[in-house]
Image (cartoon, helix red, strand yellow):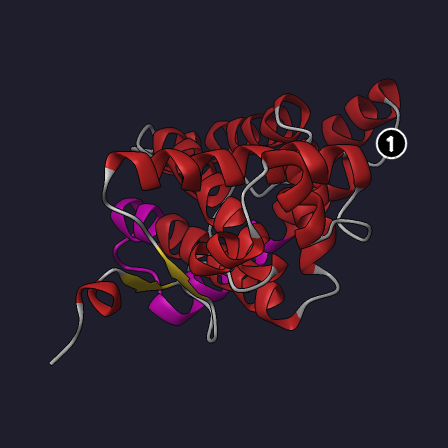
Amino acid sequence: MPTKKTKQMETGTAPGFLRLVPTQKRSRERYERILQCAALLLTEKGSGAFRMSDVVERTGIPFGSLYQYFPDKTAIIGTLAERHHMVGRTCVEQHLAAVKSVKDLHPALRGIVDGYFRMFVDEPVMRDIWQATQADKTLQKLDREDVEFLAGLLKAALTRIAPQANGQDLRAFARLTMTLIAAAVRHAITLKPKEADRLLALFKQLLPKTLPVH
């Protein structure tokens, strides 16, 4: 029979991504404090220099208590990533909701690019989270699954406006489009503001205006 503690364990999207998610107010506040501190440390130090010991030192929370919530730094970064993924998904959903015909597709995709870039500008920690995903296989899988989810949102919108199109073609089209948008935005955030604006302006001109309908 599962214990109370076991019932509180939550499995994340990626395998091995296990953590204790508290339900009581005091524990929840501690959990949130850990994440807030971790976000600040990631921004200050970068993902490569980020350590669990930094969180302990900054928050005053003992290692034993920290490990109850997050077994390693991958779990912390992964939790932060999941939260930002949810914000990104809301952004994509809002823009795709306006797609009622093929002519609405290009403006919606441009809006998604602008919205994603603004997220990275407004939340600098997202850059460090993304950099961390490049060095950790568990986080890489989390990132791939997010792109796949976004591709599913786009495919649903495309199917709505072009129900006669081949479903496999739409899936491939949606996956490629969302992958390219993510790559363009992540490259743009490494540039100076004016360079980033020029790059994204060019990229938005290249976004598809038609569908792969056979």
Question: How many numbered marks, from 0 up?
Answer: 1
At 48% from the left edge and 50% from the top edge, which residue is drawn? 79
At 68% from the left edge and 40% from the top edge, which residue is drawn? 57
* Residue furthest top in the image: 194
At 23% from the left edge and 45% from the top edge, which residue is drawn? 23
In the rendered structure, which segment of residues is drawn in magenta? 156-179
Q: Main secondary structure of the magenta part?
A: helix
The x, y position of residue 199, in whole percent, is 81, 31
Residue 178 lies in magenta, yes or no? yes
Neighbour tally class for label 1: few under 14, some 14-19, many 20 plus, Cα within 10 Å = few
Quadrant (top left/top right/bottom left/bottom right) for the C terminus: bottom left
At 64% from the left edge and 72% from the top edge, which residue is drawn? 137
Q: Quick check: can you spot residue 13?
A: yes
Asked whether, in this view, residue 115 is left or right of residue 163, the answer is right
Q: Amino acid at mark 1?
A: Leu
Mark 1 = which residue? 191
Q: Determine whether 109 is above or below 196 in the image.
A: below
Asked whether, in this view, residue 42 is left or right of residue 11, the answer is right
Q: Determine whether 172 is above or below 126 in the image.
A: below
Rendering quarter of residue 25: top left
Quadrant (top left/top right/bottom left/bottom right) for the N terminus: bottom left
Q: Determine whether 51 is above or below 16 in the image.
A: above
Relative depth, front residue between 74 and 166: 74
Q: Determine whether 159 is above or below 41 in the image.
A: below
Asked whether, in this view, residue 25 is left or right of residue 188, the answer is left
The x, y position of residue 121, in whole percent, is 68, 24
The x, y position of residue 87, in whole percent, is 44, 35
* Residue furthest bottom in the image: 1
Residue 161 lies in magenta, yes or no? yes
Rendering quarter of residue 196: top right
